Image (cartoon, grey):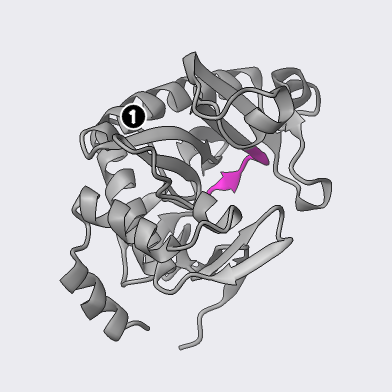
Amino acid sequence: MMKKKVYEGKAKIIYKGTQPDTLVQYFKDEATAFNNKKKGIIPGKGVLNNFISELLMTRLSDINIPNHFIKRINMREQLIRKLDIIPIEVVVRNIAAGSLVKRLGIKEGKTLSRPIIEFYLKNDELNDPIISDEHILVFEWASHTELDEIMALAVRINDFLTGYFYSQKIRLVDFKLEFGRLWNNDDSSIMLADEISPDNCRLWDLQTNEKLDKDRFRQDLGEVDKAYKEVAYRLGVLSEKEFKKVIKNDI
């Protein structure tokens, strides 16, 4: 039976789920940067991101962070709850890197005195511009209550992930989150959506500051697949032997 495609993004394809109010999230090997200006293929990336995101979403559920993940279906797909996605990207920064360095002239690697939470409008045509909480409220992308909840969840997620990655000798530099509304008749609740993986997290080795994320692709550092595998191995979601086995049987 052919699956019905709902949406295709840069790194994932969303299909209609087999159960009511669900979707199937398929992880691709395609990699993009600079708003689709740079494109490439990272063999096995989709498999690794699927397994990594499954682990981290499950761990967040364990500490009562509501999210859309239901279960992993196979090597590249997971069943998720259907949410009304809020058109905002939430970026949490612990260490200066990426656009923060370019915008403000801060030295890369500077540890911030406290985490910074930034908001960006999800709009590729506008290059995902940075926005303030006032923009969000005035243009009604989220209510005041929803925004407060999103910020509180972002802080909790950062606290947990920072410690979790640190235990595996990985420094969580920054990461991007997306949220959505889960509707129950006329009532809705905020849930974490999208994924958590080296695609949307900056991850550095704790000792050497070696980059273990998509910056290796953005900055032409090479060995991108090796970095993603290293994260998966450290988190214990796949061994080298298991990865070779699942890739051999890839759908």
Residue at (71, 32) in percent of width and height = 141
Of the residues shown, which amino acid type is indicated by label 1? Thr
Picture quarter with the N terminus: bottom left
Query: Could you say which quadrant of the image residue 89 lies in?
Result: top right
Residue 75, position as x, y percentages in the image: 32, 72
- Counting labels gives 1
Residue 71 placement (x, y as % from top left): 30, 59
Residue displayed at 43% across by 63% down: 223
Asked if residue 66 is among those painted magenta in the image, a careful observer would answer: no
Dot 1: few (<14), some (14–19), or many (≥20) neighbours within 10 Å? some
Q: Which residue is mark 1?
A: 162
Residue 111's x, y, as percent?
46, 20
Residue 119 visible in the current orientation: no
Up/down of 143 relative to 245, above or below: above
Residue occupying the far bottom of the picture? 1
The boundaries of the magenta stretch are 83-88
Which quadrant: the C terminus?
Answer: bottom left
Q: Nearer the viewer, residue 90 or 139?
A: 90
Pinpoint residue 170: horizontal percent, then vertical percent.
31, 38
Is residue 79 among the parts visible in the rendering?
yes
Residue at image point 36% right, 68% down: 47
Does 38 sit left or right of 160 as displayed? right
Name the residue nearer the viewer: 239 or 23.
Answer: 239
Q: Is residue 236 above or below residue 46?
A: above
* In the image: residue 77, left or right of residue 215: left
Inspect the magenta stretch and tell me whether residue 85 lies in it. Answer: yes
Name which residue lies at 80% across and 28% down: 139
Q: Callout 1: helix, strand or loop?
A: helix
